[in-house]
Amino acid sequence: MRFDVLTLFPDIFRAVMNESIIGRAQESKIIQVNTINIRDFSTNKHRKVDDYPYGGGNGMVMTAQPIYDAYNSILTEVGNKPRVIYMSPQGRVLTQKIAEELKSYEHLVLLCGHYEGVDERIIEEIVDEEISIGDYVLTGGELPAMVLIDCVSRLIPGVLSNENSFTEESHYSGLLEYPQYTRPYEFNDRKVPEILMSGHHANIEKWRRQQALKRTYFKRPDLFERLSLSKEDKKKLQEILEQ
Ligand code: 4FV
């Protein structure tokens, strides 16, 4: 899977995208993350990429021409039109389900705004959809782009060492993940739950499911109410709520 990021700050990506899981996935060529510096495409003699908003108001708006030419440099290279996502607080909010959708695209172009955002005409001209990472305003679309790349890339076969490791993670099946423990057995007088030391896999699996149900029930009632629980899950939850 290829991600092309249109940004004014390509260096921001180098530190995050070349480390850990995403870095290794790039090395093994499972994913490719390219940054294109919008400023390199400005035809302004001072390499300007923003200007004052028509109609007045605070802040600056990114001008259309550099973005448009940066985008076209990708088109010239690949030929067919990739899906273009503008990282914006006005977009649908990124969820695990949307990440699942996005992993089916071979090539995504992520447009990162800055300042007050981008000229509306570039959205009309090249953007297929807007995606937000949450209902708050950031200084730029770079962090949202990295969040999207991270959560989508993890779903691509070969990126995570164990193909199914994300299936137990929070939000994959609509549930929050069960608590995790590792060595040492005792930390600050707190021991690991005995069930996890039992070696009884069926009981461990049952305990983990119960913990996931309980956590979702208490921590995210909004997610819980969307679940359609099986008879077994209802029984497991009842058991643990009665404890
Ligand atoms: C944002 C978000 C976000 C708005 C103005 C960048 C900023 C500036 N992007 N999810 N929340 N973007 O706040 O995606 O252009």
Image: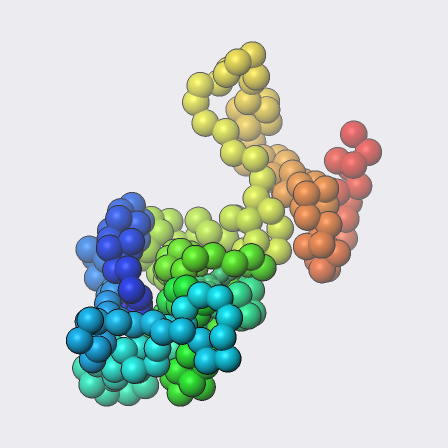
The answer to whether residue 181 of the structure is visible from this angle is yes
> Based on the displayed image, in which of its 4 quarters is residue 206 positioned?
top right
Q: Nearer the viewer, residue 179 or 204?
A: 179
The x, y position of residue 215, in whole percent, is 66, 41
20 in relation to 174, above or below: above
Residue positioned most to the right: 242
- State the image coordinates of residue 69 (x, y, percent, origin top left): 25, 82
Task: Say which residue appears at 43% left-offset and 22% top-offset.
Answer: 183
Identify the colour scheme used. Answer: rainbow
Residue 205 lies, with reference to residue 127, above or below; the image says above
x 47%, y 57%: residue: 138
Above or below: residue 204 compared with residue 116: above
Q: Name the residue: 52% across, 58% down.
A: 137
For image coordinates 39% across by 82% down, the residue present is 122
Q: Quadrant of residue 71?
A: bottom left
Give the quarter of the image for residue 177. Answer: top right
- Residue 33, visible in the rendered structure: no
Q: Is residue 13 left or right of residue 120?
A: left
Give whichever of 95, 193 is nearer the camera: 95
Q: How far from the left and from the top, in percent, is residue 52? A: 40, 73
Instruction: Count the numbered circles shown.
Output: 0
